[in-house]
Image (spheres, helix red, strand yellow):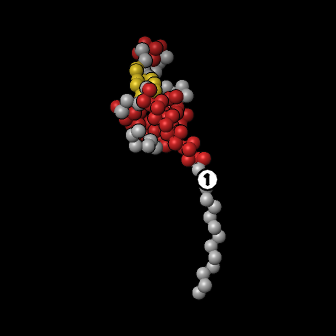
Amino acid sequence: MPRRPGYATLAILKAIANGYRHGFDIIDITGLPGGTVYPALGKLETDGFVSSRWEDPEIAQDERRPPRRYYELRKAGERLLDETFAEFRRLDRLPVARARPRRPSRA
């Protein structure tokens, strides 16, 4: 597995997995700024975790807005998301040692 993804990357992958397919929707659902989302999407696509396609320009024109770029998880992105969340679930099952009270020092 590549380097463990950070919070922003996981949030973006999870948003796409949950059906949020274009940049503004991903920004809205994650609360991340566009300056984080768009470069991360580019890197995720370059690294083979997501693919993208532009919508038909006529649809955007009919709706009087710019064309949207839609993102989709590739198998590698699904695996990365599954493996990372599995790691977190394993971490959650680890016993947590309770801190022992400190005895006052004898000075």
Relative to residue 39, is residue 59 depicted above or below? above
Res 34 visible: no
For image coordinates 40% across by 33% down, the residue present is 44
Mark 1, residue position: 95
Given residues 33 and 91, the one toward you in this image is: 91
- Quarter of the image where the C terminus is located: bottom right
Locate residue 89: give its quadrant. top right
Locate residue 2: give its quadrant. top left
Indicate the secondary structure of the residue bearing disc 1. loop
For image coordinates 44% across by 26% down, the residue present is 75
Percent from the top left, x then y, of residue 97? 61, 59
Percent from the top left, x then y, of residue 16? 50, 29
Percent from the top left, x then y, of residue 43? 37, 35
Res 17 visible: yes
For image coordinates 63% across by 76% down, the residue present is 103
Q: Amino acid at mark 1?
A: Pro
Mark 1 neighbour density, 10 Å: few (under 14) some (14–19) many (20 or more): few
